[in-house]
Image (tube, grey):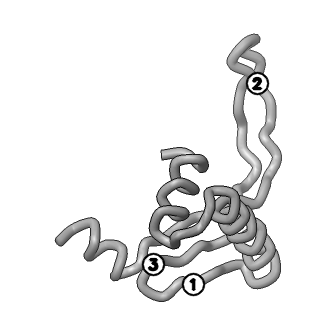
Amino acid sequence: MNKTELAIRISERMGTTQQEARRFINAFQASLGDALKEDSSLVLQGFGTFLLWEQSERAGRNPCTGQSCMIRSRLSAKFKPGKGLLEKLNP
């Protein structure tokens, strides 16, 4: 499923337009990013937890040339599903 398909499903469930559903999705993405930067985690009870973590610097290589290089450290996000989501997936 991609963002457009998700917007269609949300608009059908909420009885809104697809444009409003896309605005909701975009607002959620922006709010999630802001929350992770501020608090380093976001907990949605029953759904799951988004966690901010730092990937350390590591060795890599350019796939085109095969030349080795260092990949600098960066921030990334992880998701840990909550009990409610796991129960829905595994009845």
Q: What label sits on residue 32 in the rendered view?
A: none
Residues 32 and 73: in front is 32
Circle 1 Cα neighbour tier, 10 Å, few/some/many (<14 / 14–19 / ≥20) = some
First of labels 2, 3 by sequence position:
3
Q: Which residue is mark 2?
A: 68
Q: Quadrant of residue 16?
A: bottom right
Residue type at mark 2 is Ser
Query: Which of these two is toward me, 38 or 62?
Result: 38
Q: Residue furthest bottom?
A: 45
Q: Identify residue type, mark 3.
A: Phe
Callout in the foreground (2, 3): 3
Q: Which residue is mark 1?
A: 43
Residue in the picture at 76% in, 49% down: 57
Q: What type is the residue that disc 1 sits on? A: Val
Whether 28 is drawn above or below 67: the answer is: below
Tell me whether circle 1 and circle 3 mark residues in contact (CB < 8 Å): no
Secondary structure state at the residue bearing disc 3? loop
Q: CA distance from mark 1 to mark 2?
A: 39 Å
Q: Quadrant of residue 28?
A: bottom right
Q: Report x, y in % for residue 8.
A: 53, 54
How much space separates mark 2 and mark 3, taking CA atoms? 40 Å
Image position, residue 27 (x, y; %): 74, 69
Which residue is drawn at the image coordinates 48% and 77% (left, top)?
48
Q: CA distance from mark 1 to mark 3?
A: 8 Å
**54 shown above or below 71:** below
Check disc 2: other Cα within 10 Å, few if <14, some if 14-19, many if 20+. few
At label 3, counting other C-alpha atoms closer than 10 Å, the crowd grade (few under 14, some 14-19, many 20 or more) is some
Residue 2 placement: quadrant: top right
Q: Is residue 62 left or right of residue 1?
A: right
Q: Which residue is mark 3?
A: 47
Residue 41 sits above or below residue 5 on the image: below
